[in-house]
Image: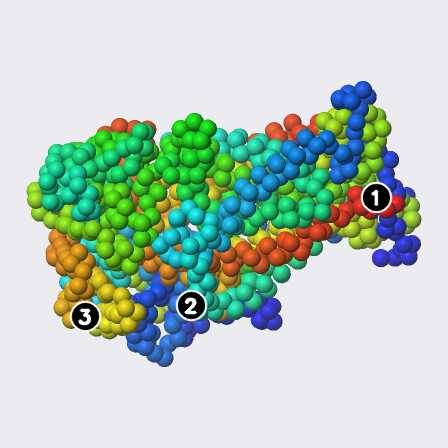
């Protein structure tokens, strides 16, 4: 009867560790584990690995999707440093992410806590908060332009009521990103739903224990709620960061969509993946776009690893198998 | 599975781990209650109700605007009023008459169900594999799972198309749902987080009772993480139902179109020459959205179940 | 594999007896009737119309997989980019075989789809630009002026200043809207310059005429409150409604595409509309045209049929039959038929002389006649191998100046570098 297939705390003997590692392959748990993750392994080999390698190879070529392809060595990667749009779009994307991720997590957690305490009507409110997620982005894109209009928009009218002259959200370079952040907060319902599911798995007994200990409301939030849902918080931090760094739809529909909006696109809304899309499909520099992708991949990788390292101390798992 | 020992469906509540105890003597007035039962003062309750109603108004706004715009005549779509002065239900009739909407709905339902069911089951299996077992290569492989989310999808579009084309499936609905048979990084990560949150005593107890992995997956992990599985299902229904890019690239035969792909033809048709008829665009958007709201309304009840209720019963 | 295929709802689009198109949507009778005629011309081949506006991802995926549609319809500004990379078939042989003379089409529409003297696209739509004037605004604030003269730039600046109104910090009426960035080529042409050489190989974005055009047009906007307030007011217009900017007196005058006259006719038939040709600084009218064209992708499984198909879609007889049907439908519904401009010279003549009739509304009849009159003065941005990337270069330069991030010369010099690099790269394959 073992619950730990790997013996705990190996001594720093490299050869012994290697032997144990090799031996562990023969363990029946290992076989079971690989059976469980088999679907992903098959899918990765069939559908993902090939295209990923292809994009890496193409990043060293002048592939355009149409004509013959030539090897251009490191030219595409060199161009990344000469192209001013790369720095502009990367900076836009980082600013947007730095604003959006913490704001959306805080708002989602606040709404989820609020929902948890609503009795019978909670189903209704859950649906309400999730509605904007389901509303097609076309509509949200139009609404952004209508509501945030500097002249007649509702947002600036409301600001006018409290004596504030609102900015030109849709044209002023320094206000475009905050406006878009506010718009994307509408879609916070997805994160709310994840937090709700996590909050529902917190055993009540923990709160009761905390109550017995005489902890206040804030204390039990900090010491029970947050650690208990830290797995979900960690997940949303990583996933929302990755998604924000790849923001495409919101900026594209509002500023780069078909027809007239396309021509008004200002550099302030040039997000990295929007630029990547232009290079790949509109300018037909698929090779350069592949190099752009791998730069973004590296940026995301570094940020994710940093986040994972920093969060490690705060994330609590009931069932953590990681021995290192 | 070989074991015949039944696994308790209502496991005993786990004892709270010591390090979770809140420090003593902090917080005002020592009045703590569990959320949901905590009695707030009248001011607190009023504030909470106010926040809830205010937030609801803001979150309801885009959808109300959309429904209202879809019922307006062309010339007043942008008139900033939430009630149409003149109710135009024919905007919907116009879409219904213009296109084979019924066929598209059947296609969409098929593709969406296949996509959502496939991804929920496969991601749960893979996530359980990563959460429950320690095995050589685990961390590296899980890192690879996360890494697949980091490369922008835009650049994989053409190579993936070439893969399906080489299988002679590029003009079919298969590429819309079949990738989900192999799990999806986002849901694998999500479900792994939930599986890791389960009290390990449950699994230890089951093992002592002689339960195999499959049984532990089926009888402990899945039931206790039902809210997360429902979240996965709902998210994927939403994603598959609204996906436009893949149907646009892969589908050529109008008989195979899904609803968003089909409605794009409506939008382009009513937008020819720049004279976009926004009321039709909005009506089409409502047609896409309503079925999802129904799915969400049905599924959201499941969010309330889970370990909290199971634990209390015991 | 076959059973799996059957479950997945597979149909084989590469079946030899199916002819496929991309980028076309059958909307009104004008497009539907022509599609019927072109389909009939290919009989017994089965025509499958993959409806929806042209999409770059859709097209490029199919081309990369060597499985392109048989015929494709796209914005003419994109044709040069695809043609330079070899994604489109030259139409020289096709036009010979079918006995079609490129001169049958409007020169502006053919030029925009002609790379290095080779035609790659036949026009399927044709947008004209003319000046729209709010007569009431002009009468009230125009200081006795009866018309807007775009050839006198100083006078135009004074007019814009006279006509625009402000209320505190807000702009409440635009005096004159130059409609940049999208109409910037019109101002460059008016100033006697061009964005690119006629052969489409040399960008001229930093030439004195272009810099001056940008300085002037941005100056117009700055004098009326600046870009932020200007665009905010423009975005708040009820463009498609009865309370549109002309009916509400929210704008004095601006250049606009001809389709908008149809919108006005439907939404507000009594609007105080005036129309005038847009004049260059030398006093001659100029008409900036654009639109969509049909092309044949390289690798089309049915190149001969594709040629037959696109020549039928764009033939004078097809347009005439389609316009007759459209006019009938509109009149049956009790609305006025304003006319159609097709890019086909003969079709335009027959439509105006035989199908269109005066509607009884002086403003709209004048507009219809004016659109016809300016056709001989039409120009388009020449086709070039950098396609969208070239357009994007000058548009971002204009946007950067509008938002105050850069000075006109600086922005245009950077755009010139970028555009020329893209052009050189696009033509690299030839050498």
Front-most of residues C80 and B119: B119
At 49% across and 33% down in the image, what residue appears?
Answer: A96
| Left or right of residue A248: residue C166 | left
Residue A194 percent across, percent down from the top left: 66, 43
At 44% across and 72% down in the image, what residue appears?
Answer: C15
- Residue C145 at least partly seen: yes
Specify which label sits upstream in the sequence, 1 or 2. 2
Asked whether the residues under marks 1 and 3 belong to the same chain, the reply is no
Q: Which residue is mark 3?
A: C355
Residue B272 percent across, percent down from the top left: 33, 59
**Which of the chains bears the disc numbered 2?**
B
Q: Which residue is mark 2?
A: B98
Front-most of residues A157 and C121: A157
Residue C348 percent across, percent down from the top left: 17, 65
Work out whether A133 lies above or below C32. above
Look at the image and tell me in which quarter the C terminus of chain A lies: top right
Asked whether the residues under marks 3 and 2 belong to the same chain, the reply is no
SS of the residue under disc 1: helix
- Identify the image quadrant of residue C88: bottom left
At 29% across and 59% down in the image, what residue appears?
Answer: C266
How far is the residue under mark 1 from the one under mark 2?
Answer: 54 Å
Q: Which residue is mark 1?
A: B311
Looking at the image, how many numbered discs can be counted on the residues?
3
How far is the residue under mark 1 from the one under mark 3?
Answer: 79 Å
């Amino acid at each position: 009867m073992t619950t730990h297939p790997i013996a705990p705390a190996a001594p720093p003997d490299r050869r012994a560790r290697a032997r144990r590692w090799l031996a562990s392959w023969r363990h029946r748990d290992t076989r079971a584990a690989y059976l469980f993750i088999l679907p992903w392994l098959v899918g990765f080999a069939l559908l993902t690995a090939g295209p990923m390698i292809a994009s890496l190879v193409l990043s060293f070529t002048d592939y355009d999707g149409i004509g013959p392809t030539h090897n251009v060595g490191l030219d595409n990667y060199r161009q990344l440093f000469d192209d001013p749009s790369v720095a502009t779009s990367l900076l836009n994307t980082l600013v947007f992410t730095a604003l959006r991720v913490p704001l959306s997590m805080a708002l989602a957690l606040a709404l989820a806590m609020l929902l948890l305490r609503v009795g019978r009507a909670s189903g209704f409110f859950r649906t309400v908060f999730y509605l904007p997620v389901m509303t097609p982005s076309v509509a949200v894109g139009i609404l952004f332009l209508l509501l945030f209009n500097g002249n007649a928009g509702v947002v600036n009218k409301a600001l006018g009521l409290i004596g504030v002259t609102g900015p030109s959200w849709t044209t002023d370079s320094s206000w475009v990103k905050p406006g878009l952040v506010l718009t994307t907060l509408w879609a916070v319902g997805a994160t709310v739903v994840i937090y709700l599911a996590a909050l529902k798995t917190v055993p009540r007994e923990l709160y009761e224990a905390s109550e017995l200990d005489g902890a206040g409301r804030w204390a039990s939030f900090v010491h029970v709620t947050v650690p208990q849902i830290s797995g979900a918080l960690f997940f949303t931090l990583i996933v929302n960061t990755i998604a924000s760094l790849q923001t495409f739809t919101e900026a594209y529909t509002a500023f780069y969509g078909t027809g007239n909006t396309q021509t008004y696109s200002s550099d302030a809304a040039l997000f990295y993946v929007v630029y990547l899309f232009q290079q790949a499909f509109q300018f037909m520099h698929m090779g350069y776009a592949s190099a752009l992708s791998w730069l973004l991949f590296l940026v995301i990788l570094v940020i994710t690893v940093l986040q994972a390292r920093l969060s490690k101390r705060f994330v609590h798992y009931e069932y953590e198998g990681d021995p290192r | 599975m070989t074991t015949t020992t039944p696994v308790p469906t209502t496991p005993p509540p786990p004892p709270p781990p010591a390090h979770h105890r809140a420090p003593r003597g902090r917080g005002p007035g020592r009045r703590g209650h569990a959320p949901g039962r905590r009695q707030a003062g009248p001011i607190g309750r009023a504030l909470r109700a106010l926040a809830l109603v205010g937030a609801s108004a803001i979150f309801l706004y885009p959808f109300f605007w959309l429904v209202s715009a879809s019922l307006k005549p062309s010339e007043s779509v942008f008139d900033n009023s939430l009630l149409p002065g003149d109710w135009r239900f024919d905007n919907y009739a116009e879409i219904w008459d213009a296109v084979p909407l019924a066929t598209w709905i059947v296609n969409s339902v098929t593709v969406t169900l296949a996509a959502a069911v496939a991804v929920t089951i496969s991601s749960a299996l893979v996530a359980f594999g990563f959460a429950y077992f320690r095995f050589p290569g685990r961390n590296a492989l899980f890192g690879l799972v996360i890494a697949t989310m980091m490369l922008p999808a835009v650049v994989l579009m053409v190579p993936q198309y070439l893969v399906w084309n080489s299988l002679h499936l590029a003009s079919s609905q298969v590429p819309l749902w079949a990738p989900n048979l192999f799990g999806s990084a986002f849901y694998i990560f999500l479900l792994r987080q939930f599986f890791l949150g389960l009290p390990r005593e449950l699994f230890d107890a089951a093992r002592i009772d002689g339960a195999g992995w499959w049984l532990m997956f089926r009888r402990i992990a899945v039931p206790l993480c039902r809210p997360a599985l429902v979240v996965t299902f709902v998210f994927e229904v939403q994603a598959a139902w609204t996906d436009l890019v893949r149907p646009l690239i892969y589908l050529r035969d109008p008989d195979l179109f899904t609803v968003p792909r089909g409605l794009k033809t409506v939008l382009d048709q009513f937008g020819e020459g720049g004279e976009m008829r926004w009321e039709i665009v909005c009506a089409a958007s409502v047609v896409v959205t309503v079925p999802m709201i129904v799915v969400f309304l049905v599924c959201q009840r499941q969010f309330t179940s889970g370990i909290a209720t199971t634990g209390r019963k015991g | 594999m076959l059973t799996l295929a059957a479950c997945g709802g597979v149909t084989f689009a590469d079946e030899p007896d199916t002819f496929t198109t991309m980028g076309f949507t059958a909307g009104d009778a004008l497009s539907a009737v022509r599609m019927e005629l072109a389909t009939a011309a290919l009989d017994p081949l089965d025509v499958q119309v993959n409806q929806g506006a042209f999409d770059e991802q859709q097209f490029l995926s199919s081309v990369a997989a060597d499985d392109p549609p048989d015929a494709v319809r796209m914005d003419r500004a994109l044709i040069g980019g695809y043609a330079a990379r070899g994604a489109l078939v030259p139409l020289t042989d096709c036009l010979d075989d079918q006995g079609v003379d490129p001169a049958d089409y409007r020169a502006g529409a053919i030029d925009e789809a002609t790379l290095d003297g080779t035609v790659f696209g036949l026009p399927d739509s044709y947008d004209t630009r003319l000046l729209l004037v709010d007569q009431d605004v002009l009468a009230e604030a125009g200081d006795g002026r009866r018309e807007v003269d775009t050839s006198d730039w100083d006078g135009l600046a004074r007019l814009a200043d006279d006509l625009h109104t402000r209320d505190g910090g807000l702009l409440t009426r635009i005096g004159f809207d130059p409609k940049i960035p999208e109409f910037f080529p019109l101002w460059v042409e008016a100033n006697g310059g061009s964005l690119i050489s006629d052969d489409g190989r040399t960008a001229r974005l930093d030439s004195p005429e272009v810099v001056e055009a940008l300085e002037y047009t941005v100056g117009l906007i700055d004098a009326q409150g600046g870009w932020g307030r200007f665009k905010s007011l423009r975005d708040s217009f009820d463009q498609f409604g009865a309370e549109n900017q002309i009916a509400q007196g929210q704008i004095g005058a601006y250049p606009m595409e001809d389709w908008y006259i149809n919108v006005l006719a439907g939404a507000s038939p009594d609007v105080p509309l005036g129309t005038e040709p847009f004049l260059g600084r030398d006093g001659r009218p100029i008409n900036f045209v654009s639109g969509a064209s049909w092309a044949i992708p390289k690798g089309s499984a049915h190149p001969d049929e594709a040629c037959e198909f696109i020549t039928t879609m764009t033939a004078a007889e097809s347009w005439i039959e389609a316009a007759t049907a459209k006019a009938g439908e509109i009149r049956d519904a009790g609305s006025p038929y304003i006319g159609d401009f097709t890019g086909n010279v003969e079709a335009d003549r027959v439509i105006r002389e035989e199908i269109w009739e005066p509607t009884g509304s002086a403003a709209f009849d004048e507009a219809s006649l004016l659109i016809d009159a300016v056709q001989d003065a039409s120009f388009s941005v020449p086709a070039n191998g950098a396609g969208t990337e070239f357009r994007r270069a000058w548009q971002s330069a204009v946007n950067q100046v509008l938002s105050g991030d850069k000075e006109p010369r600086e922005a245009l010099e950077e755009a010139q570098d970028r555009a020329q690099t893209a052009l050189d790269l696009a033509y690299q394959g030839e050498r």
